[in-house]
Image (cartoon, rainbow, N blue to C red):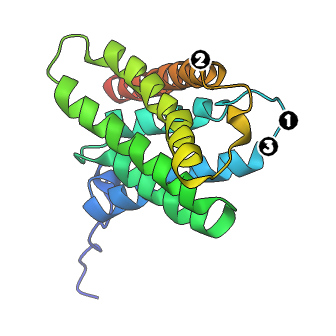
């Protein structure tokens, strides 16, 4: 007891999130959360692409808020890890999720200096979610892996995936903007 105060380990929440390893862990956890949502929200709506709401919202939020160059791809890797544990179609889901994460990150890198980046990223998330029926069609045509979502043809799943991806991307953007507003208010 020399009369010295103990050193502060965490001065505020911004110090907490400045830790690189914690950021990566949170990004991977966000991806795992997308897979959990997919499994937990199995409502029989018969609308292909409905899980794009939560998936694209989380991927968009992660992409916009994380400083890592490939944040959406890291989140997708977290989702792949979770799908290996809780999903029965982990191989197909892994391919699709990785393609979506890479697509979002690549488009963001191309668009990040454009004046309409945020508006264009909403369309990017919609297009990224449209990759799912396209990849499933490719796997069905080339490997014989049948997908129920393609029973009505390709056009209907493409449209529904685009719409759900668009709304999910918008939700992710609005969540990110809310976080930015909270930061500036504090």
**Mark sitting earlier along the chain (3/2):** 3
Q: Residue at x 55, y 54 (%)?
A: 143
Q: Which residue is mark 3?
A: 42
The reply to whether the C-beta atoms of the residues labelled 3 and 1 are less than 8 Å apart is yes
Percent coordinates x, y for residue 82 in the rendering: 57, 62
Relative to 186, 139 lies left or right: right
Q: Residue at x 47, y 34 (%)?
A: 131
Residues 155 and 116: in front is 155
Mark 1: secondary structure? loop
The disc placed on residue 44 is 1
Q: Which residue is mark 2?
A: 159
Q: Residues within 10 Å of mark 3 (few under 14, many from 20)?
A: few
Tell me if residue 49 can be seen: yes
Percent coordinates x, y for residue 38 in the rendering: 68, 46
Which picture quadrant has residue 6? bottom left
Q: Kindly report which numbered mark, 3 or 2, lies closer to the viewer in this rendering.
A: 2
Tell me if residue 12 can be seen: no
Q: Residues within 10 Å of mark 1 (few under 14, many from 20)?
A: few
């Amino acid at each position: 007891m020399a009369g010295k105060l103990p050193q502060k380990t965490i001065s505020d929440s911004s110090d907490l999130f400045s830790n690189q390893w914690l950021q990566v862990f949170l990004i991977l956890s966000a991806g795992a959360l997308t897979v959990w949502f997919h499994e937990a929200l199995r409502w029989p709506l018969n609308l292909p692409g409905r899980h794009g709401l939560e998936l694209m919202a989380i991927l968009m939020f992660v992409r916009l808020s994380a400083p890592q160059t490939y944040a959406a791809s890291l989140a997708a890797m977290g989702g792949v890890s979770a799908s290996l544990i809780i999903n029965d179609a982990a191989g197909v889901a892994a391919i699709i999720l990785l393609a979506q994460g890479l697509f979002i990150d690549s488009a963001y890198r191309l668009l990040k200096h454009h004046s309409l980046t945020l508006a264009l990223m909403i369309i990017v998330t919609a297009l990224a979610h449209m990759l799912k029926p396209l990849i499933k069609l490719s796997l069905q045509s080339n490997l014989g892996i049948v997908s129920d979502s393609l029973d009505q043809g390709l056009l209907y799943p493409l449209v529904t995936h685009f719409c759900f991806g668009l709304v999910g991307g918008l939700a992710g953007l609005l969540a990110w903007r809310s976080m930015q507003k909270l930061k500036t208010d504090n």
